[in-house]
Amino acid sequence: MEADVSRSLNTLVIGCPKEVAVADAEAGGWIGGFSRVVRFEVGSNSAEAESTVSFVPFHGFSSFVKSLHIKFTILPSSRVFNLILSFPLLEDLSLTADDVAIDNGDSPDEPPTVSQPLTPPMFTGSLHLFLNQGGSLITRWLLSIPAGIHFREFTLTWLHAEDPLLTMAVVEKCSRTIETLDITCHLRKPSPFCNGAGTDSLLCFLAKSVAIDLSKATKLKNVVFRPKSMSVKWITTAFRTTIPKLPELGQISIHVPYSPGIFDIKQSNINVYGGWSDLDRLLVQFWESCCTRPKVICTALFGGRRDMEEFVEYLFPELTKRGLIDLAELPTGRLGVYNPIVTIT
């Protein structure tokens, strides 16, 4: 019966990997019964349990796994990396964590040893990273994989000054394959001084940096930028220096944060919304040269469409005047708590 069930499974979701691993050992290894799973999701919101969890029972339990999603409070670096490398046909990888911990005395400069030959091509789908701390460690290890990475889609949330550099490294490594780049620059209200940590260090980096160079990504077709409110300058600079070199780029999406009442006070938000007029003019030039309509997406919990249209018109007067904006509404929602123990579909 178990074998029949495993053949029909597509997704396995485990929310308490430590408890499941213990149960697997006591039951004589039932995890291996899910040998036809294609999508594997594993996560926990207990930092104490995560510090001692063993992923060995999950290593390569299904040779058909193509999509791996890992979500933890604190990501145990080498144990998770070894788990990633245990699936020889892995295409899509998603990592979400508040922090990445160096475990088992590993050196941050040396990735764990690959325990088995990797079957190319691996990592040909999507890479999604939301790592509040320590993202550079996992990214460097991914970049060092002997077989290489060949992602077609890359989604990253910028939280620290190192993140734009990680973007550059991944784009360069996947320059012949990457087609979609999706970047969220998560800037909250900055302090008056750049103290080298978190939001402030990222804001300082964006103010001083020239651009992220996308010109090597010759296959890039779709760019999605979620700049929040204070980080638009880097987009303008990146577009100005790279758009002429990306002949296949056909879709540009700009996400604009909106909340009711913001239109009434926007005149006083010079520092917050400065630089949007430059982006407006640049997107018009892009339209004139490539005939690609920019898509502006208003992210809002609630609010009238007309208010959103007026807000977008304020930020993009030239695009609005020419009727070139495809305005889309995308309501935001709360992130759900990752709490399933085991879910199979």
Image: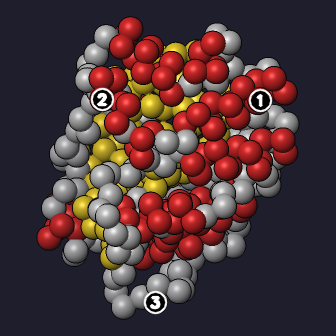
Secondary-structure class at tag 2: helix
133 relative to 216 in the view: left or right: left
Q: Is residue 306 visible?
A: yes
Which corner quadrant holds the C terminus? Answer: top left
Residue 209: percent from left, percent from top: 61, 64
Distance from Cα at disc 2 to Cα at disc 1: 29 Å
Q: Secondary structure at mark 1?
A: helix
| Residue at 66%, 61% in the rendered image | 210
Q: How far, Cα to Cα, is label 3 from label 1?
A: 48 Å
Establish if 219 lies above or below 313.
below
- Residue type at numbered disc 3: Ser
Going from N to C along the chain, the mark reached first, 3 or 1, is 3
Residue at 54% x, 86% y is 110
Q: Looking at the rendered structure, which numbered label has been put on residue 285?
A: 1
Structural crowding at the residue carrying mark 3, measured as other residues with C-alpha within 10 Å and reported as few (<14), some (14–19) or many (≥20): few
Of residue 89 and residue 307, the one placed in the foreground of this image is: 307
Which numbered disc flags the more N-terminal residue, 3 or 2? Answer: 3
- The reply to whether dot 3 and dot 2 touch (C-beta < 8 Å) is no
Relative placement, left or right, of 40 versus 14 is: right
The residue wearing badge 2 is 265
CA gap between label 3 and label 2 equals 50 Å
Residue 256 bears which disc, if any? Answer: none
| First along the sequence among labels 2 and 1 | 2
Q: What's the residue type where badge 1 is placed?
A: Gln
Residue 107 badge: 3
Q: Residue at x 38, y 70 (%)?
A: 194
Q: Give the residue drawn at x 28%, y 16%.
A: 303
Q: Nearer the viewer, mark 3 or mark 2?
A: 2
Residue 98: x, y in percent?
29, 62
